[in-house]
Image: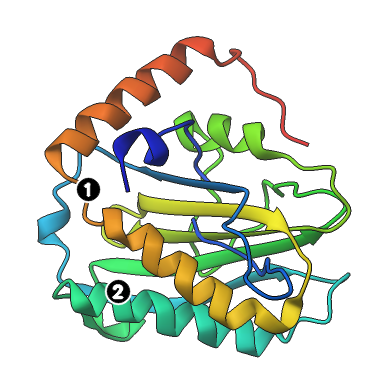
């Protein structure tokens, strides 16, 4: 994935909800990857999956199927890069968490925490997320976070959003999109320089007191 496509606009908020058309499903309308460019991603050797948070009241989506689909897809990509999956009790280097939403608006609830980790509504992680609010009634989004368990802070995030046309194709669509997103993991030194520029740019542009809906 080219740098320009990965860093089109900054978003903290990752990956990736059900969004799928009948027949050949289109790519996600919005897909953005963000990460902390000051981290050494080679130090991450283990990961644990802790599930996620779903707000899917307007869709007939099986939350267990969604949870298992994200788990299998992310685990496949991380294991392919040499990481080993462990339990939370085994002190993993990374914690994998997701957030899925659908409905008339994709809003972020500042007090919605999961697994003891902050929702991260500060710095660029928060400001960029506000750029992706949606008012489309049939929108869905999936955000997948890789959290540095020792620092208890975000390391890498992918966020995807699209109109939902066929929930039956959700597992296949999510699996393919996660696979595409992880083509840029771990980020290269060139990627890190690009994202630093994006972070600096949006840091200058954001208001002093951002408002969250």
Query: Residue 116: where, in percent of width, then height?
Result: 50, 65
State whether residue 139 is above or below residue 3: below
Which residue is the extreme one toward the front?
Answer: 23
* Residue nearer the viewer, 188 or 46: 188
- Residue at the spot 10% in from the left edge and 58% down from the top edge: 42
- Residue at the spot 22% in from the left edge and 79% down from the top edge: 79
Query: Residue 199: where, in percent of width, then height?
Result: 38, 25
- As measured in the structure, the alpha-carbon distance from the residue carrying label 2 to the one carrying label 1 is 14 Å
- Residue at the spot 64% in from the left edge and 32% down from the top edge: 131
Residue at label 1?
A: 187
Query: Residue 67: where, in percent of width, then height?
Result: 57, 82
Residue at label 2?
A: 77
Badge 1 crowding class, 10 Å Cα cut-off, few under 14, some 14 to 19, many 20 or more, is many
Res. 26 image quadrant: bottom right
- Residue at the spot 21% in from the left edge and 28% down from the top edge: 193
Answer with mark 2 or mark 1, whichever residue precedes in sequence: 2
């Amino acid at each position: 994935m080219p740098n320009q496509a990965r860093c089109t606009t900054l978003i903290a908020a990752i990956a990736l909800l059900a969004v799928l058309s009948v027949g050949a499903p289109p790519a996600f309308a919005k897909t953005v990857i963000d990460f902390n460019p000051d981290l050494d991603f080679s130090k991450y050797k283990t990961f644990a999956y802790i599930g996620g948070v779903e707000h899917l009241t307007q869709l007939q989506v099986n939350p267990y199927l969604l949870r298992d689909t994200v788990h299998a897809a992310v685990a496949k990509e991380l294991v392919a890069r040499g990481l080993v999956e462990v339990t939370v009790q085994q002190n993993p280097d990374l914690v994998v968490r997701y957030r899925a939403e659908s409905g008339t608006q994709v809003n972020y609830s500042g007090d919605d925490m999961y697994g003891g980790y902050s929702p991260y509504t500060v710095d660029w992680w928060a400001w960029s997320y506000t750029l992706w609010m949606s008012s489309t009634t049939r929108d869905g989004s999936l955000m997948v976070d890789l959290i540095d368990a020792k620092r208890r802070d975000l390391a890498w995030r992918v966020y995807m959003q699209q109109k939902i046309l066929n929930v039956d194709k959700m597992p296949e669509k999510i699996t393919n999109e996660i696979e595409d997103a992880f083509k840029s993991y771990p980020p290269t030194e060139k990627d890190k320089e690009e994202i630093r520029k994006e972070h600096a740019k949006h840091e200058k542009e954001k208001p002093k007191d951002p408002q969250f809906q």
